[in-house]
Image: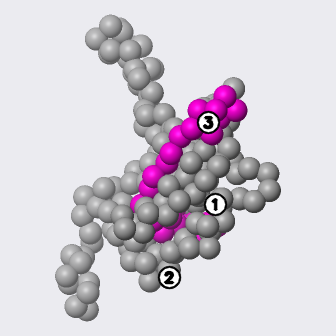
């Protein structure tokens, strides 16, 4: 059963360009989640998202996503079993073949976090996240620039380089 947290406050640190979201468990355990304001625009660009609520939900649950599953040391397992036990690599932002595939895999990861680890939700009534919704900072130009960076990095990761060097493409 996942631990449930309720968002109690949102603060803006304009000097350091951060958002701080505070949430509390039913037992009274308080946690603070600080993240750069640009994170919203980055997640929109990385996963092709346009719903600020979904982006916030993803950002708040990402810290609770488990790392790759630990594997028993292969030296302790006989050779035929080693092949069968080798985990399937998780699809990530840069191993996905497309933004859609990356988005689907990341949505599944966050759904797993919410089903098995942690659920973070706004309180009934006034929602502190409204402050971030009003000032999310996602712009068409910023989104386009970040999307290009993500797509370029993904292509290089998957294929080892660009079909045309960036300098040549920009001079064309």
Q: Describe the element under mark 3 as helix, strand or loop.
A: strand
- Left or right relative to 161: residue 101: right
Q: Name the residue under label 2.
A: 140
Discs 1/3, front = 1
Residue 104 at x, y percent in the picture:
58, 53
Q: Residue at x 23, y 78 (%)?
A: 166
Q: Is residue 9 above or below residue 4?
A: below
Q: Earlier in the sequence, mark 3 or mark 2?
A: 3
Q: Which of marks 1 and 3 is nearer the N terminus?
A: 3
- Highlighted range, magenta: 24-52
Discs 3/2, front = 3
Q: Mark 3 points at which residue?
A: 118
Image quadrant where one finds the N terminus: top right
Q: Describe the element under mark 1 as helix, strand or loop.
A: loop
Q: Is residue 63 above or below residue 154?
A: above
Q: Mark 1 points at which residue?
A: 129
* Spatial CA span between label 2 and label 1: 22 Å
Q: Which of marks 2 and 1 is nearer the N terminus?
A: 1
* Spatial CA span between label 1 and label 3: 18 Å
Using a 10 Å C-alpha cutoff, classify the residue at mark 2 as few (fewer than 14 neighbours), some (14 to 19) or many (20 or more).
Answer: few
**Is residue 46 something that shows in the picture?**
no
Residue 36 at x, y percent in the picture:
42, 61
């Amino acid at each position: 059963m996942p631990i449930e947290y309720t968002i109690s406050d949102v603060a803006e640190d304009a000097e350091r360009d951060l958002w701080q979201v505070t949430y509390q468990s039913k037992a009274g355990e308080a946690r603070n989640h600080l993240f750069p304001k640009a994170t919203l625009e980055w997640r929109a660009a990385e996963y092709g998202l346009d719903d600020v609520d979904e982006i916030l939900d993803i950002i708040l649950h990402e810290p609770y996503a488990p790392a790759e599953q630990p594997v028993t040391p292969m030296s302790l397992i006989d050779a035929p079993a080693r092949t069968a036990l080798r985990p399937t690599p998780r699809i990530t932002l840069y191993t996905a073949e497309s933004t859609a595939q990356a988005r689907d895999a990341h949505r599944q990861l966050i759904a797993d976090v919410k089903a098995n680890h942690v659920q973070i939700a706004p309180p009934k009534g006034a929602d502190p996240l409204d402050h971030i919704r009003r000032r999310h900072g996602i712009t068409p130009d910023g989104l386009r620039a970040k999307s290009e960076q993500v797509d370029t990095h993904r292509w290089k990761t998957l294929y080892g380089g660009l079909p045309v060097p960036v300098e040549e493409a920009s001079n064309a």
